[in-house]
Image (spheres, helix red, strand yellow):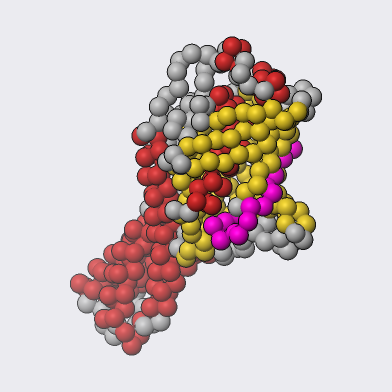
Amino acid sequence: MRLALIIWIGIHAIIHLFGFFKSFGIFEFSAISQPISKTLGLLWLLGFVLFAITVVLLIAQSNYWFIMGMMGVIISQFVIINHWSDAKFGTIANLFISMAIIVAYSNFSFKSTIKKERIALFKNLEPTKDDMVTKEALVNLPPVVQKWLTHSGVIGKPYISSVHLVQELKLKMKPEQAAWYTGRAEQYITVEPPGFNWSITTQMNPVLKVAGRDKFENGKGEMTIKLLSLIPVAQAKNDKKLNQAALQRYLAEIVWLPSASLSSYIKWESIDSHSAKATMAYKGTIGSGEFYFDENGNFIKFVAMRYQDSKASEATRWTVVATKTEERNGIKIPVECEASWALKEGEWTWLKLEITDIQYHVTEISND
């Protein structure tokens, strides 16, 4: 899609250069029968320059190409109007470029909004104490949770205050969907205050791209999904069901920062020798889930009765299963997981993820 746009704008730019050549008698541009004044010729040249810069920015994958592109469209349309009888079909080219510009600006604006949210999340971040996690800090936890934390390698290491991670994803948006969509996600998680901000981009086909953002902040959840970063497909916030679902997601994801399980907001109950229930309460929102571990202390799965969305009439069994565990930054965590909903018609595995990068104790937002 980017390549096609580069070629389209490049050809459009060259046509404007010919308009400049005609005005100064350098080259006879027969497509325009009317004479072109030198003043308008300079505007034809300016249109060429702006479109040429746009092409360079597109090749460089700059997020700001749309600025030059829009200026180019404005100048281009002005000279086209002045030679309407011969150049009117150039308006079609400008319309296509304008559509691409609108999508690019929407994507830029959506990303800017997410970045502001993340900056706000980190503005309230309270770095965890410099103390290391000790065995004594684990004594009041269920034995299986103690085993998990010991096996994960958190003892003797600082309490984790924040995390930045990147995920490669496979998704099925509907239970009946056969093929997997691929996507990429970026997430920030904080411990005090507890919160996360997760953004995703997935390509549904060569043309349609879906962008989404899910967050948990101040005890509340919020979800937005947009087609081409422009058209809202789903949006929800200020809902008790969504708040609880977001909190339960946060709870499930503490396996990526195990020392967060020692948070004062989380209470643990033993179920048996291989499982324990965690209940989290924060700013009026309460949720729980069950953690399951193998005999070595590796996390196996998280299970919770969770609302699929704010419109759901009842909670559905939601399961996150670890399919691969590795050591990252000295801590053993699940690096590949699958998430499923237990629907009446059967199990719907809708997400498979792989963590490709994870950084602890981050203090600022990435510019990616």
Residue at the image position 64 percent from the left and 59 percent from the top = 173
Which residue of the protein is positioned furthest toward the left in this rendering? Answer: 39
Occupied quadrant, residue 331: top right
For residue 348, side relative to residue 284 (left or right) = right
On whether residue 311 falls in the magenta region, the answer is yes
Visible in this render: residue 226? no
Visible in this render: residue 280? yes
Seen from the viewer's position, the closer of residues 108 and 187 is: 187
The quadrant of the image that shows the N terminus is bottom right
Residue at the image position 52 percent from the left and 17 percent from the top = 158
On whether residue 295 falls in the magenta region, the answer is no
For residue 91, side relative to residue 194 (left or right) = left
Seen from the viewer's position, the closer of residues 358 and 118 is: 118
Residue 87 in the image, given as x and y percentages of width and height: 36, 81
Seen from the viewer's position, the closer of residues 15 and 353 is: 353
Residue at the image position 65 percent from the left and 29 percent from the top = 269
Circle count: 0
Q: Which stretch did the figure color magenta?
A: 308-325
Residue 260 in the image, given as x and y percentages of width and height: 55, 27
Residue 264 in the image, given as x and y percentages of width and height: 50, 26
The vertical placement of 286 against 270, above or below, is below
For residue 124, side relative to residue 295 (left or right) = left
Residue 171 in the image, given as x and y percentages of width and height: 66, 53
Residue at the image position 43 percent from the left and 69 percent from the top = 99
